[in-house]
Structures are given as C-alpha cells and as structure tokens.
Image (tube, rainbow, N blue to C red):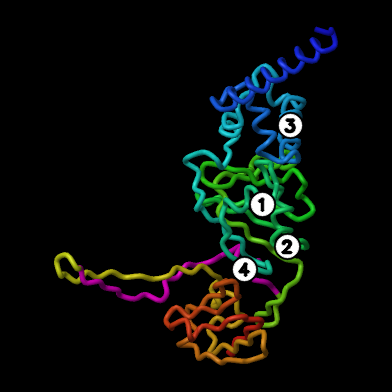
Amino acid sequence: MPKRTLVILIVVALVVLALAGLVIATAVGARPLAPFRLATRASWGLLADEAATIDNCTADGCHKPVDLHTCGACHDEHGDAQLTKVPFAGLLLLTGDVPEPGYIPINDILPVLEVTRTVMPLLDFLKHNKVEEFESVTLASSDGGLATVAYEDLTPQSLLMPYADGVRFADEQLHISTWMKGVDRIIVVGREKPLRIDGQDTSIGRLLLGPTQWVTVEQTTVMLKSEEDGQVRRAKTAMRVEGAAVGELVANPGFTALVVRDARGKETTLPAEEARGTLLAVVFGRVTLVLPGGGRGQWIADVVEISSQP
C-alpha cells in the first residue's frame, strides 16, 4: 500500500474515532465536553460576556483562579435572584415625581433588558423608567429605613443588587449607612414643582417624604355560600392608601372649603365637612385627592392646585 494512502487512512480513522467519542460522550453528558455543548446552545456574545465576568472577577481579586466554582455557587454567594428563597413575585414601588408611578416586579429589575450582570446601576434603572432629571431619590426599606441621596451624589457605582428580601442598595462612594437591604420603595423628587397649595409650589414626590398618613378606604363586606355545607361566610375587604394630609399643608387649617383644580382646569369646591381628613396621594399613577369617607367616584385625580378658603 502506498505510504500516502496509509497516512490518509490513519488520519481518517483518527477523525472517525474522535467524532465517535465526541458523540458518545455528548450523549452520556460527559462533563469535560460541557464547553463544547454550550457553544452550540448559547450565543457567542453571551459566552463572551460570561467569560469577561469571570476574568474581571479573578482580576479584581474577588476570587482566586484556583477557587473558581460553578455559576450557581458564585451567584449564591453574592445573593443572586436565582436563589430558591428569593421572591420572584416581589414588587418594588417606584413613586413620586416620575412619569409612570407603580409597582415593578423585582425580577424585571434584575436583570433589566438584556443586562447579564447581577447588579443594576440605580441611574440606569431610573433612566429605563423615563426618569433622567431629578433632585433626589429616596430608598425605603421594608423595616422602615430611609436613605435620601441627591442626584449629584449618585454615581455609576450606585447599585441595585439582588437580596433575599428583594433588592439591596450600595455604593462604595457613599457612606455605608446609606446602604440598604430589603428596598421596597423608591421615591423620586423632581426638579419641577407642578403642584401648588395655597400659593406654595411643591410636588407629590416632596410630599411623600413626609409626614404622611395611612387611611383605609373602600371598605366593603363580601360573602360566599359554600357548595359543600351551604353556609354563608363573610369577610371585609378594603384598600390602604398613604398620602400627605391636606389639612396640614394648607395655609388655613380651619378652612371652610377647599377649591381643587385638576390638570384639565376643572375646579371643584369641597365644603369643610367633606374635605376634612383628605389626603394627597398617588393612586394608580395619578396625583389624587383621596376622600376617605367617599367612594372612588368622589376622589379628584390629576390635582395641580389646592386653595383653602378661610
């Protein structure tokens, strides 16, 4: 047999054996071939991002190369939202002087869009929610903590990070006392003051920083007749609303009436007996005058001015 033919046969045999081994190993899930399998299942961009993360992690001294471990272990150590006890259904309230106040699922924040990191810069989060120009931001935790940071004191290192109670905040450029775990509300104070109360310009973001009050509204009794034993069981439902007490904001606490103007220019006059105990709050994304003693149909939405009559 010619020497050239023999070499070709040997090469072909080796290639066949290698391919056969690859197929068998892939079928049984051999760990050494995981990188090869992953290359066929994930985009090269994603793999490059993950490789860069590992490289940065080792370069910054976060981990030693000899101690590198699985993604799950690394994420667990840093409180990643993939932990089994993390509330994926948890919500964070973004309110105040923002275009679209409301609750945001924590799982939408980390990650947001196609960010592959397990952190989200606070400024990026706000920008994603159409908040770019503002005076300050206040982070409130579920245990009553508050931290207010002016716009100019925020940095790209002002980070929202996963935490067992939802979201935590930290920035190595800020004092550690501003770091917070279990953040459940973010209140933004804008630069503009579109709300006027007895000639004083303010905004709902400023008012929500306090003092505020909680009221229980729309209480109703519900009932259900059981198909099993025929008994009718009753319960009460209601809604809790937090806002600024109007009686503490107006220039005339003993007012006889309130004149309320909305964004469309419509004016509504409320006699004192109806206006006592009213709150200014954000209800379904709108600045609303809440009348605790009245139904939602009596509430005034999109409030821009309140005047008290002595």
Q: Classify 10 Å Cα crowding around label 3: few (below 14), some (14-19), many (20 and above).
A: few
The label nearer to you, 4 versus 3, is 3
Q: Which amino acid does label 2 sit on?
A: Val
Residue 208 lies in magenta, yes or no? Answer: yes
Instruction: Report the Cα–Cα distance between label 4 and label 3.
Output: 46 Å
Residue 307 within the magenta-colored segment of the rendering: no
Contact (CB < 8 A) between labels 4 and 3? no
Q: Nearer the viewer, mark 2 or mark 1?
A: 1
Tell me the number on the disc at residue 51.
Answer: 3
Secondary element under disc 4, as helix, strand or loop, is helix
Q: Which of marks 4 and 1 is in front?
A: 1
Name the residue located 17 percent from the left edge and 65 percent from the top edge.
Answer: 228
To which residue does mark 1 refer?
112
Name the kind of residue labelled 1 in the image.
Val
Res. 209 image quadrant:
bottom right
Q: Which mark is residue 102?
A: none
Q: Is residue 267 above or below residue 167?
A: below
Q: Distance between the residues labelled 4 and 1?
A: 29 Å
Q: What residue type is labelled 3?
A: Ala
Q: Which of the marked residues, 4 or 3, is nearer the chain's N terminus?
A: 3
Q: Are marks 3 and 1 in contact (CB under 8 Å)?
A: no
Front-most of 52 and 178? 52
Q: Which label belongs to residue 131?
A: 2
Image quarter (top left, top right, bottom left or bottom right) of the N terminus:
top right
Between marks 3 and 2 in the image, the one whose residue lies nearer the viewer: 3
Q: Nearer the viewer, residue 275 or 262?
A: 262
Q: Which is nearer the N-term, disc 3 or disc 2?
A: 3
Q: Mark 4 points at which residue?
A: 207
